[in-house]
Each structure stands twice: as C-alpha cells, then as structure tokens.
Image (cartoon, grey):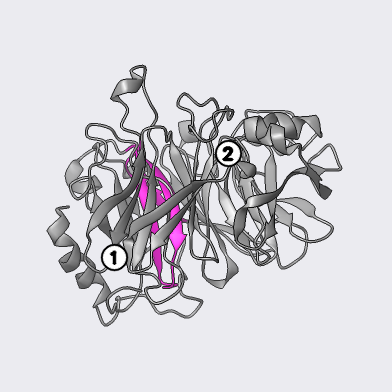
Amino acid sequence: MMKNLFAAAIGAVFSMNALAGTPDMKGAMSFDPIPASAYNEAASDPAILNSEPWVIPQGYRQIIISDESALDIYAGMSDWGDMNTVNETKKHAGRYMYRTHEVRPGADLSAFTGGAVSVIDLNTGTAKIIAQRKDWEALDGIVWTPWHTLLFAEEVVNAALGDPQVPQATSGLLYEMELDKHDLMTASKVSVRPLLGSLSHEGIEIDAEGNVYVIDEEKTGAIYKFVPETYGDLSAGQLYALRVKSSDKTGEAEWVALDMSQAQISARIAAKAVDATQFCRPEDLERIGNTLFVALTCEDVTNPASTGGAGAVLSVRLSDKPKVSYFVAHGVNVVHEDQANRITGFKRPDNLANGPDGKLWIVEDNDYSDIWVAEPDLNGDGYSDGVNLFASLKDVPAEGTGIYFGKDPHTLYVNVQHSGTGNDKTMVITKRAHHHGHE
C-alpha cells in the first residue's frame, strides 16, 4: 500500500456509520469464532496478502496502516516489524504507534546498520525512524511506561555487538527512551538500563507499583521482576527471579534476589545460581489486573523438563504470596494442533494483549499463525474458562506479532512479519462503527 493511500483507506473503514452484521451485544470485540486455521485459504498472491492476509470473523475489516512501501528500514530483508505500542496517556493518547524492528547482524558486522525504533502517526500515516544504533541487535519488546517513557529491548542470547556503556553484558539489554514533549515523533534521549538484566529480552510489563517484569527467551528461561528504589527511576533497584516451590512449576512461588553485578553480565547465570524456575522460551508478558500472563512457546505442561512442547500460557498472581498456574494448555482448554492432518489447535504462543472485557488475546509464532482469545478464569481452577479462534494468517511463512489494543476497544493492532511477499506490514482489524481522527 502506498503511503499516501493511508488516510483514504483508514478513513473509509473508520468513518462508516455501521458495519453490517455486527450487533455489539457481548462486548466491544464480540465475535463468532472462525471454524479453522487458514489451511484452505493459504495464499502466495501479493494481491491477496497485501490487502487481506487474515481470515477473520464476519463483521470485521482488516486494513494495512503501514508497510514497506511507506518505510523500508532494511531493504531486501523481511525482519523489520515486531512488537508495538501506542502513546497511552496525555494529550495525544492513541495517536502514535511506536515499533521496534528485529534484525540481526550477519557475518559481516561492518554492513549491519543496527536495530531501530520507528513511529507511525495514525492521523496521517507518516512513518519514520526515531532512533537507530549500530550496536542494537534484534530489538523486540517495547512498552509504554506510566511515567511516559518507552522501554524497548534486545532479543539476543549471545551479543555480537556490545553496548559501549555496558561492555560486560553478554546478552541483550533494555533501553529507556524519552520523547520530545513538543514532538512525539522525535526521541530526546535514550538510556541503557543494565540493572534490568543482560538477557534475551522480549516481553516487558509494568505493575501499578512501578515494578518492571522481563523474561529470558531461552529454552531454560526464567521470569524476572525489577523493583526500583524510586518509582519511575530504573537506574537503581534490585532484580529478582521467580522460583516456584513445586517441581511441576505451578503453585506457590517467590521472587528471589539476584547478584546485581552478575545480572548485568548475565542475569541467566544469576538466576540459575538461586535455582530460579526454568520455563521453555518465555516470550511475551501481559498484565491484566493483578495477574501477569507469560507466553511459553515450547512449554510441555505434561513434562516440565521437556523443551519440545506445544507451548502454553502461564499466569502469575502478583501479590505478597505469588501463585503460578497454567492458564491455557492443550488437552485442558484447547486442542493440540496437528497440521499434517489439518486439525486446528493451539501451538507456539508468542505475543499477548490485554483485550476488552479482561480477555487475553494470544498470537502464535507458527505456520498459519492464529490469534486466540482466552476468557477469564471465573471458576477459580487457574485455567481460562474458554479459548476461541479469532483469526488465522493466510501468509504461511509469516508470523503475527505485536498484537495490541489502544484506547479504542473495537480495534486490534497487529503486525505481519516474515511475509512470503517480502512486504511486512502493520495492520488494524476492527469492527468500530466510526473514527474521528486518532483514537
């Protein structure tokens, strides 16, 4: 989609008085689940994949709001789009979308231009880079803080390009960006925050007290909590790792303090030194109320020691006495996917979003990447009371990422990366009746 088509395309959808066949009787994003993954609708035609790459429920529309024709950061590469967030607070709430761009250096480090953070003005469609550095590798997770900064981080197990301010770090680092108060499409300052651990970062989440949660995306990865000395100041504080008391990784747990010198070299080593619980590739984090949800891409709920499972979503109760449960798991509240026999199911959960009505939205890192919606646990057994299929990607090698709801509860943002067309994109899927400028 050409950049100058943005306003017309987004306006045509959001200015409609109503979307036919979408009575909103059960919440802002109520839907009839689609019957199956996109097995019978897989496509390679750019005309399809650059306009309607998702199978979605009736009554919904999908629109590309930015793609590589508007901003091609890494020409010829398909790893440009990943997590995203928007400006949550203050005067321009919902107007701007901020994205990290996951790209990794090749053998020739001199040719690597470095990771980047970009922004889209959702009023005009203008997209531009606001920060880029040659030593940034595989930028992935990004989140807006309550104190009005952006946190973003590197998803790097073994760093090839070190940060000159933290030369001892062996893995990825977390950064904090301040935006220009008069121009939210300009970064005024970026600071490295090594106390949040040298890790293979992805998910980042913040609780009401200003504590920051991060993960280590390894097959033996842990879940971490950073407690700052002062609210909103990430330059001083203590990093902890989650340790579940039971060997089956569920039940009562505790946050165990780490050696802070070691955490800045490798928080992974610091966590293992205190016997922190290991999970199979923790990826994204999402907080809903006092519960932290964790996407575990290869977790095997039947064999805690396995690193070859179909994945699960974990819940961690955030209280003085943490409690850990599996929230979504095949064989309990979802079916195991069997692609060979075209059986739709749940596999490799990756990105999470806090959706309307307290529901957890989940997108898979998988062929025919699916989007699932998990109902809250109202019966108290720890598991979601129901998990339903919302969408499925026709672009088989592609992956949905960066799933997100802003101020508008009728509109879901999602990226498509690794597209078979080579044209990665940021999209909205919406049932909103009308739109007045930004959200």
Residue in front for this viewpoint, 165 or 364: 165
Q: The disc labelled 2 sits on which kind of residue?
A: Thr
**Principal secondary structure, stretch drawn in magenta:** strand
**Element type at marker 2?**
loop
Quadrant of the image occupied by residue 222: top right
Q: Position of residue 103 (x, y in %)?
A: 37, 34
Quadrant of the image occupied by residue 98: bottom left
Instruction: Write the start and end of the magenta stretch as one range.
Output: 390-418
Q: Is residue 21 left or right of residue 325?
A: left
Q: Position of residue 111 (x, y in %)?
A: 29, 24
Q: The disc labelled 1 sits on which kind of residue?
A: Leu
**192 versus 113 height, above or below:** below
For marks 2 and 1, give the CA distance.
31 Å
To which residue does mark 2 refer? 297
Q: Is residue 421 magenta?
A: no
Q: Is residue 3 left or right of residue 115?
A: left
Q: Position of residue 32 (x, y in %)?
A: 45, 65
**Quadrant for the C terminus in the image:** bottom left
Q: Is residue 70 left or right of residue 188?
A: left
Task: Please state the total of marks drawn on the protein image.
Answer: 2
Residue in front for this viewpoint, 161 or 14: 161
**Element type at marker 1?**
loop
To which residue does mark 1 refer? 122
Q: Residue at x 72, y 54 (%)?
A: 316
Residue 312 seen in the figure: no
Q: Earlier in the sequence, mark 2 or mark 1?
A: 1
Residue 26 seen in the figure: yes
Crowding at mark 1 (Cα within 10 Å: few <14, some 14-19, many 20+): many
Q: Position of residue 108 (x, y in %)?
A: 33, 18
Residue in front for this viewpoint, 268 or 424: 268
